[in-house]
Image: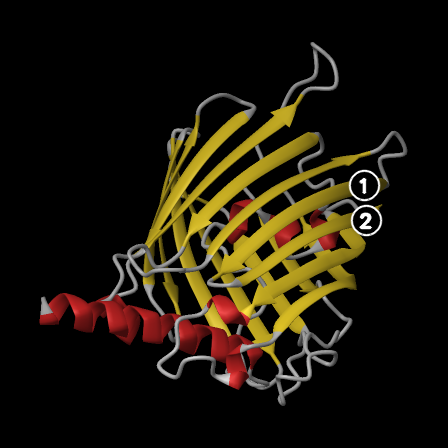
């Protein structure tokens, strides 16, 4: 019985600690995190819009740190497509991100202008929308009853604006983006909270290349570098192998964090199903959680019955 109480206390303490990290000025990661970022590019870069050369819709569900009470969870839905002009592409993304008593809902529209060259496509993108934040700190369990630090609440709707550039060919891509350039304050109107928690600017650099090893095996390394003010630069290194244009198998390493395994199935020319698992054995949180799960579904619509869906590897 004592062991169970101790474990429950540790889990609650971890939850409070995570929330404090969020409201602290040095919180490292405010944007939602994805393991399958190489198949979900619109979440990082508005210039990714239209790169599938069809109407493309993606659903993604992420449960982080399974087994830890009030652990983070994220759900996204995104859709993007070129328009008749072909040089212009539009996109729309909905996101829900939850951590303990903190809730975030966001809607962002993306606009991309594409410049076609003999070797590839250069895309310049903008995103704009709004984000709704809410947090009721009184719902937290604290050691000191009615602790004034945890009596405040946050309810705000704030604008979002970002930009990005993305260059891609059939075999290579590289992108640089800052999806949130507005540093909104989250707590300026909350008298119970002394520290000012703000949205920090995040910068993402992504790149990948597809190598043909044989007629049935291709190899694609990917890299994602994340930078945010007041936190160490974080890097995701990934290696995916594609077998017979159907089965993707991959492994990733996230600096300062964990190792990940990925599997994707190209069920049809239009339908891609993906799953990833984060082991999280390299952090202290591994003692009180059993890893993270992420499920992704992408569907690419044909504009006409005779429209051929060409392979897209990212």
Q: Nearer the viewer, residue 249 or 255?
A: 255
Residue 54, how many percent across, how many down? 71, 30
Quadrant the N terminus occupies: bottom left
Residue 242 can be seen, yes or no = yes
Q: Which of 60 and 259 is in front in this view?
A: 60
Residue 93, how many percent across, how many down? 69, 45
Q: How many marks?
A: 2
Residue identifier under label 1: 89
Q: Which residue is drawn at 74% across and 76% down?
A: 183
Residue 288, how many percent across, how many down? 24, 66
Residue 133, how many percent across, how many down? 66, 62
| SS of the residue under disc 1 | strand
Q: Nearer the viewer, residue 2 or 206?
A: 2
Q: Residue at x 47, y 80 (%)?
A: 146
| SS of the residue under disc 2 | strand
**Figure quadrant of residue 215:** top left
Q: Which of marks 2 and 1 is nearer the N terminus?
A: 1
Q: Residues at badges 2 and 1 in contact (C-beta under 8 Å)?
A: yes
Residue identifier under label 2: 112
Determine crowd level at label 2: few under 14, some 14-19, many 20+ residues with C-alpha closer than 10 A.
many
Q: Nearer the viewer, residue 255 or 26?
A: 26
């Amino acid at each position: 019985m004592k062991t169970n109480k101790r474990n429950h206390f540790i889990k609650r303490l971890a939850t409070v600690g995570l929330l404090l990290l969020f409201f602290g000025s040095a919180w490292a990661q405010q944007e939602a995190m994805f393991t399958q970022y190489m198949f979900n590019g619109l979440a990082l870069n508005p210039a990714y819009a239209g790169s599938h050369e069809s109407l493309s819709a993606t659903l993604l569900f992420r449960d982080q740190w399974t087994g830890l009470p009030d652990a983070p969870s994220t759900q996204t839905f995104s859709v993007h497509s070129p328009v008749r002009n072909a040089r212009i592409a539009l996109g729309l993304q909905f996101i829900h991100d939850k951590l303990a008593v903190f809730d975030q809902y966001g809607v962002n529209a993306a606009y991309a202008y594409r410049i076609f060259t003999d070797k590839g496509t250069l895309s310049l993108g903008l995103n704009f929308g709004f984000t709704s934040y809410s947090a009721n700190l009184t719902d937290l369990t604290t050691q000191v009853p009615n602790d004034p630090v945890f009596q405040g609440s946050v309810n705000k709707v704030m604008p979002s604006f970002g930009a990005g550039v993305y260059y891609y060919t059939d075999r290579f891509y590289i992108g640089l983006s800052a999806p949130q350039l507005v540093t909104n304050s989250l707590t300026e109107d909350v008298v119970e909270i002394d520290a000012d928690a703000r949205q920090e600017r995040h910068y993402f650099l992504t790149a990948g290349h597809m190598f043909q090893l044989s007629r049935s095996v291709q190899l694609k390394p990917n890299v994602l570098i994340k930078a945010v003010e007041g936190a160490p630069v974080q890097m995701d290194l990934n290696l995916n192998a594609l077998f017979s244009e159907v089965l993707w198998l991959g492994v990733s390493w996230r600096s300062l964090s964990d190792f990940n395994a990925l599997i994707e199935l190209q069920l049809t020319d239009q339908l891609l199903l993906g799953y990833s698992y984060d082991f999280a054995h390299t952090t202290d949180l591994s003692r009180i959680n059993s890893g993270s799960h992420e499920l992704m579904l992408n569907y690419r619509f044909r504009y006409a019955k005779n429209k051929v869906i060409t392979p897209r590897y990212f």
